[in-house]
Image (cartoon, rainbow, N blue to C red):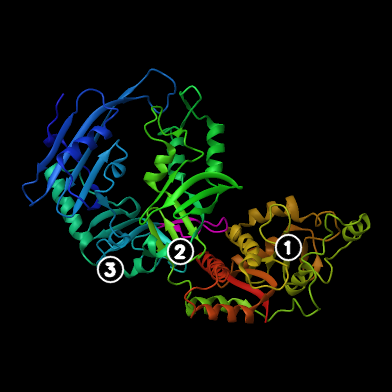
């Protein structure tokens, strides 16, 4: 069966690349042969280097074939369904355009012939005065377990109404714009641009691709997009820093597997492909979702480690990163062994790499820098939340967090602690309860905790997270308490029903085995939920009510912090731990602001 090119109708969606070298007829022939290895019968369409007469030096090649594949909802059967695949390659003097379906591996086939456009060419696409940013999905530059790793916003026009407090540490992954009535979807990481429109014949499709290229090469610039992380080259990062961790993003693959669109297989000792069952898939993705440490081996070669075990080798090239020798070498995305999970990672590049300097990140195939991290404005913002007007230290030095007996304590020491009705005076918990005394105060420490303490006053709900350690200003001492705060940040907006469940399951009981009540109001204990309910309803009914998060860290010195941070501004190579601290506190502030929460740090002078 032969089909004419004029029978093709194509969606207005294209992947666009810079052209490094001309595609010869033989190169295209060999590429088509490699991409159609699973074809059944003859090609449905096979046209190579056809001239596009409406534009000088423009050529197109089209290949389509049919193949058989076992339906995704079946396994280990002889049943197959007939499918079709196609690819269109358009080439002019400067670029190569690709449209395809049911075909993978084209970037690998054209390695050395194509290169990526700069990230800004896609994110600033059609950045005109009347451009509306309708939807944007973003990835976080960090892989910390304590922050939201991805977010999505949608509106008639996000420009002006989207919270930009954390945008400098966010990387746009998908953008939908509306410009003069035309709607475009842009995915910079895959070099793809699509337009919401009817399908078109191939002649009109090629004309559309050339017009898209003209828009890409237009040097328009969006102030809205400029607020996000700044794209830089990978070489810029590697000149003065090194990678320390990586997080893979497999949520789309997981969704495809859950929806029956795709399956995973492993190659057993008999060279047979066996489909992974549910338990095997859970174990695999539980491992792949971990944060992997990176160890430098030699030159540009590195290893991924998980719990000190080797997981994969990878190499940082001038413009890209590639993985090999992985523990998942024998995992495949099909029962024919055509595409391994490792090949999928190398092609899709769905991962984030972080470096010893937190201002840098590598996401997908592009590198980014947070230009707002080390600025006087950001440092002033950090210092503004450091509050020293509290009484946590007015009764003398603090000796511990709770004065709770340790593992090696005696029976007498444990019995004495269990007999207490208040935390000891020299503990941080006691000082916090005294500072927030004039409120409904809940001790939620231990177990499934929202915070160490929750304070409810006439117009404010505050979550208090406490940390005691020796005097320090380093990032490591703050990471635990900030992580706890960010992990439960959404709980600040919990409903009254959620409070009631916690009351009956936990708060009505004393603190562990002690006589210390978890519930206090104006210094006195209580045990009825109506006290909490009435206070919450009072806060919720007021338009000027506030939500706050306090980090009770009296070991932390504001003056020392200010001195260290300001010394970084004139330092071209600041201490990595100090930069990590700036990033950590900036993330705390911006995350709180995104949730409409006021952040504070209770520290010393």
Q: Nearer the viewer, mark 2 or mark 3?
A: 2
Image height check: is 563 above or below 256? below
Relative horizontal placement of residue 500, taking residue 237 as reference (left or right): right
Q: Position of residue 410 (x, y in %)?
A: 91, 56
| Mark count | 3
Q: Are marks 1 and 3 in contact (CB under 8 Å)?
A: no
Q: Residues within 10 Å of mark 3 (few under 14, many from 20)?
A: some
Q: Residues within 10 Å of mark 1 (few under 14, many from 20)?
A: many
Would residue 405 be seen by someone viewing this image from the given angle? yes
Relative horizontal placement of residue 280, taking residue 166 as reference (left or right): right
Judge by depth and name the residue closer to the eye, 458 or 146.
146
Q: Position of residue 243 (x, y in %)?
A: 49, 58
Residue bearing the label numbered 3 = 221
Q: Which residue range is magenta in the image?
A: 138-154
Residue drawn at x 32%, y 59% as measured from the top left:
119
Image height check: is 171 above or below 326? below
Image height check: is 90 above or below 148? above
Q: Identify the element where label 2 is drawn.
A: strand
> Which quadrant is home to the N terminus?
top left
Mark nearer the N terminus (1 vs 3): 3
Q: CA distance from mark 1 to mark 3?
A: 51 Å
Residue bearing the label numbered 1 = 442
In terms of image quadrants, where is residue 494? bottom right
Q: CA distance from mark 2 to mark 3?
A: 23 Å
């Amino acid at each position: 069966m032969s089909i004419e090119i004029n029978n093709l109708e194509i969606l207005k969606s294209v992947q666009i690349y810079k052209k490094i070298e001309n595609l010869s007829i033989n190169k295209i022939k060999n590429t088509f042969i490699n991409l159609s290895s699973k074809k059944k019968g003859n090609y449905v369409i096979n046209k190579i280097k056809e001239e596009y007469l409406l534009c000088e030096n423009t050529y197109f090649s089209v290949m389509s074939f049919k193949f058989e594949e076992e339906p995704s909802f079946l396994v280990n059967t002889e049943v197959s369904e007939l499918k079709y695949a196609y690819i269109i390659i358009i080439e002019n003097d400067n670029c190569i355009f690709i449209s395809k379906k049911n075909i993978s591996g084209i970037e690998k086939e054209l390695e050395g012939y194509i290169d990526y456009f700069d990230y800004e060419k896609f994110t600033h696409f059609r950045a005109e005065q009347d451009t509306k940013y309708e939807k944007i999905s973003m990835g976080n530059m960090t892989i910390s377990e304590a922050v939201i790793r991805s977010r999505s916003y949608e509106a008639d026009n996000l420009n002006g109404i989207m919270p930009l407090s954390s945008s400098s540490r966010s990387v746009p992954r998908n953008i939908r714009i509306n410009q003069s009535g035309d709607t475009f979807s842009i995915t910079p990481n895959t070099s793809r641009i699509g337009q919401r429109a009817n399908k078109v014949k191939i002649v009109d499709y090629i004309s559309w691709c050339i017009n898209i290229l003209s828009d890409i090469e237009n040097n328009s610039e969006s102030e809205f997009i400029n607020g996000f992380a700044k794209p830089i080259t990978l070489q810029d990062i590697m000149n003065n820093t090194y990678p320390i961790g990586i997080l893979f993003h497999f949520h789309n693959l997981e969704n495809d597997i859950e929806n029956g669109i795709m399956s995973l297989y492993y190659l057993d000792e008999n060279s047979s492909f066996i489909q992974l069952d549910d338990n095997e898939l859970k174990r695999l993705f539980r491992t792949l979702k971990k944060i992997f440490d990176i160890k430098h081996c030699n030159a540009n070669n590195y290893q991924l480690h998980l719990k000190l075990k080797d997981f994969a080798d990878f190499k940082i090239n001038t413009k890209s990163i590639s993985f090999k020798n992985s523990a998942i070498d024998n995992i495949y995305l099909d029962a024919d062994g055509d595409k391994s999970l490792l090949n999928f990672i190398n092609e899709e590049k769905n991962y984030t790499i972080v470096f010893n300097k937190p201002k840098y990140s590598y996401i997908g195939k592009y590198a980014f820098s947070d230009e707002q991290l080390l600025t006087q404005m950001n440092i002033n913002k950090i210092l503004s939340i450091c509050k020293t007007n509290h009484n946590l230290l007015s009764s003398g030095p603090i000796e511990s967090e709770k004065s709770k007996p340790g593992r090696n304590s005696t029976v007498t020491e444990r019995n004495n602690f269990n007999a207490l009705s208040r935390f000891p005076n020299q503990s941080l918990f006691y000082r916090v309860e005294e500072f927030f005394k004039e409120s409904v105060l809940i001790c939620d420490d231990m177990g499934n905790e929202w915070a160490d303490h929750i304070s409810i006053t006439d117009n404010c709900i505050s979550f208090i997270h406490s940390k005691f350690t020796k005097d320090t200003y380093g990032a490591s001492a703050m990471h635990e308490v900030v992580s706890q705060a960010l992990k439960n940040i959404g709980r600040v907006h919990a409903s009254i029903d959620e409070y009631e469940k916690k009351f009956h399951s936990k708060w009505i009981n004393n603190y562990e085995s002690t006589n210390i009540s978890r519930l206090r109001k104006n210094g006195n204990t209580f045990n009825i939920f109506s006290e909490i309910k009435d206070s919450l309803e009072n806060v919720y009914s007021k338009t000027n009510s506030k939500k706050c998060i306090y980090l009770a860290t009296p070991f932390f010195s504001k003056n020392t912090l200010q001195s260290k941070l300001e010394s970084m501004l004139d330092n071209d190579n600041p201490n990595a731990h100090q930069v990590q601290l700036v990033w950590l506190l900036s993330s705390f502030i911006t995350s709180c602001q995104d949730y409409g929460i006021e952040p504070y740090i209770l520290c010393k002078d």
